[in-house]
Image (spheres, rainbow, N blue to C red):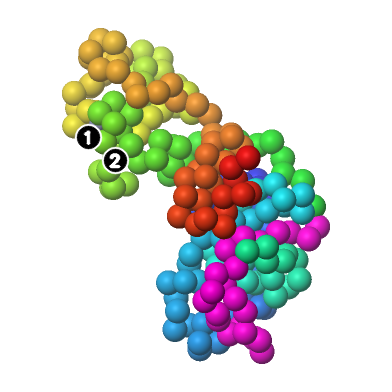
Amino acid sequence: MSSGLEDGIAPGRDAVLPAPHKFEKRLQTSSPVHRKPAIMQEPVLVLNATFEPINVTAVRRAMVLLLKGVAQAEETNPTEVHATSRTMKVPSVIRLLAYRHIPQQTRALSRKNILLRDRNTCQFCGNIFPTAELTLDHVVPRSRGGRSSWENLVACCYQCNNRKGDRTPEEAGIKLARRPRPFTLYTSRQLMRLLGYRDDKWRKYLFY
Ligand SMILES: [Zn+2]
């Protein structure tokens, strides 16, 4: 089992939560649910038993947790879906009924996670790019002993990457938008807030 928040931000895999189970299969095969695939992928905020925001998951996954009795809905949307034998309001915020210890771990160093931390923003020109148009830049080049670490890798567009070449930002006369930081629980919460702007119901749990 991997660490808790590692995959939690992007709806999909979330190791912090119990493994998908039979309810998920039932949700998948239930035709009224099937007709609304878009809503099933909407993000849902997951709170610990203590109301602390710990994760973001997809509606489908959140509904599995509700059906399993592992979590309860704290906020719902007006939309209803049919799950197993009952009709449920689509959850917006759910809360785990049993407290889960979230270890103070950091995210695995990967291209995906660096781009997530930097919000797909080139850290030199400040423009936002699709994932395919970004690369990773070693702030201190590898040829100068720069390491592949959270503190030395940033999202970078190809144009800035070419401009910078095998030089430090100072040598290339370009500035870093901000100092790269390791991915911590703090960063996760920042991302949850970012996602939370789209849903008013998340606000009271994230902005305090
Ligand atoms: Zn750039």
Q: In the figure, is residue 58 to the left or right of 84? A: left
Q: In the figure, is residue 133 to the left or right of 176? A: left
Instruction: Point out residue 138 in the picture as x, y percentages from the top left corner.
Output: 36, 24
Secondary structure under tag 1 reads helix
Q: Residue at x 45, y 25 (%)?
A: 180
Is the C-beta of the residue carrying label 2 under 8 Å from the nearest atom of ligand 1?
A: no
Looking at the picture, tell me which residue is in the foreground, 23 or 52: 52
Ligand 1 shown in quarter? top left
Q: Residue at x 22, y 35 (%)?
A: 158
- Above-or-below relation of 155 to 36: above
Query: Could you give the CA–CA distance between mark 1 and mark 2, rounded to whole angstroms?
Result: 12 Å
Q: In the figure, is residue 112 to the left or right of 160? A: right
Residue linked to disc 2: 128
* Residue 24 location, quadrant: bottom right
Instruction: Point out residue 66 in the picture as x, y percentages from the top left corner.
Output: 69, 71
- Above-or-below relation of 90 to 194: below
Number of other residues with Cα within 10 Å of mark 2, as a class: few under 14, some 14 to 19, many 20 or more: some
Amino acid under disc 2: Ile
Residue linked to disc 1: 158
* Residue 30 location, quadrant: bottom right
Q: Which residues are magenta?
A: 76-98
